[in-house]
Image: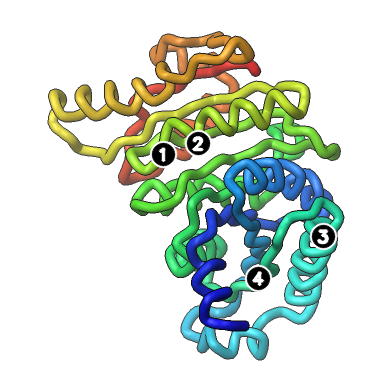
Amino acid sequence: MSDAVERFREQQYKVVVGLGHPERVEGLMRIASVFARRQKGRIVAACVVVVPPGTDLEEGADYADPEALELAEEMVQRADDFGAELGIAVDPVVEFAYDVPTGIAALCEDLEADTILLGFSPPEEASEGADVPARITERVASMTGPSLAIVALPRRDEPARMLVPVTEALDPPVIKDLVKIVALFGGAEMTFIGLVPAGLPAAEFQQRADELRAKIDDVEFEEIECIDPDARQAQQCLFGAEARQMAGESHDAAFIIRATV
């Protein structure tokens, strides 16, 4: 690969798709492909394989569970093949890490990712790994680069629910694109959660909360209808419990807005 091509790839808009379940690969790739196409970018289909603490990550394949490694390689290859069908450039990546959130965060920092797309099990399908998106959100909220969207996919391709953590790194155009993408798939329920660092003085907390809230209020689409605009009603919101959990230990939830598209 020439230096010019490599520089072009590095400068392209990058959507990192975190793959963890074979049944969600095509659904996530469909959504990511719309986003990548709109941004004239590429998809990084990534699967994190956990290795024992203290092992050499550069030699991760030697320490990984063979079945987990085989499954990861199958998922990223499936994503690559499906990307070819969709006409989207895909970089399949198997990342070794001591835990999934660390692996995703390290990959995004290394790639200078613009957006991260993750799958999430709806409550009725939640598994022992259901808290992984929450821990990744906590990591991403501390980063300055990528935006993050978490999509709840049942056993079908269309998004059923989407949770968008709103941080200072999230640009309003990303929110607008997410709304349009969800509309293209026939609609879904979305929840926006504003995240600010924990422990701020009351005045600064309110100022930063208002700035984050303005990013949502500026989204003017006929397709979007706020259901619970009052943050005090968070306990009734879809993803309410998950959203509060996703605020993490070092962040507070400034607001939670439930909307339909």
For numbered disc 1, what is the local secondary structure?
A: loop
Q: Earlier in the sequence, mark 2 or mark 3?
A: 3
The residue that disc 3 covers is: 84
Q: How far from the left and from the top, in percent, is residue 196?
A: 30, 36
The residue that disc 1 covers is: 170
Marking on residue 118? none
Marking on residue 93? 4
What residue type is disc 3 on?
A: Ala
The image's colouring method is rainbow
Q: Earlier in the sequence, mark 4 or mark 1?
A: 4
What residue type is disc 4 on?
A: Val
The C terminus: image quadrant: top right
Question: Mark 4 or mark 3: which is in front?
Answer: 3
Judging depth in this view, the residue of 38 and 48 nearest the camera is 38
Q: CA distance from mark 1 to mark 2?
A: 7 Å
For numbered disc 3, what is the local secondary structure?
A: helix
Q: Earlier in the sequence, mark 2 or mark 4?
A: 4
Is the Cβ of the residue at disc 2 closer than 8 Å to that at disc 3? no
Q: Earlier in the sequence, mark 4 or mark 3?
A: 3
The single residue placed furthest to the front in the displayed view is 4
Q: How far from the left and from the top, in percent, is residue 149?
A: 56, 40
What residue type is disc 1 on?
A: Leu
Q: How far from the left and from the top, in percent, is residue 153?
A: 74, 38
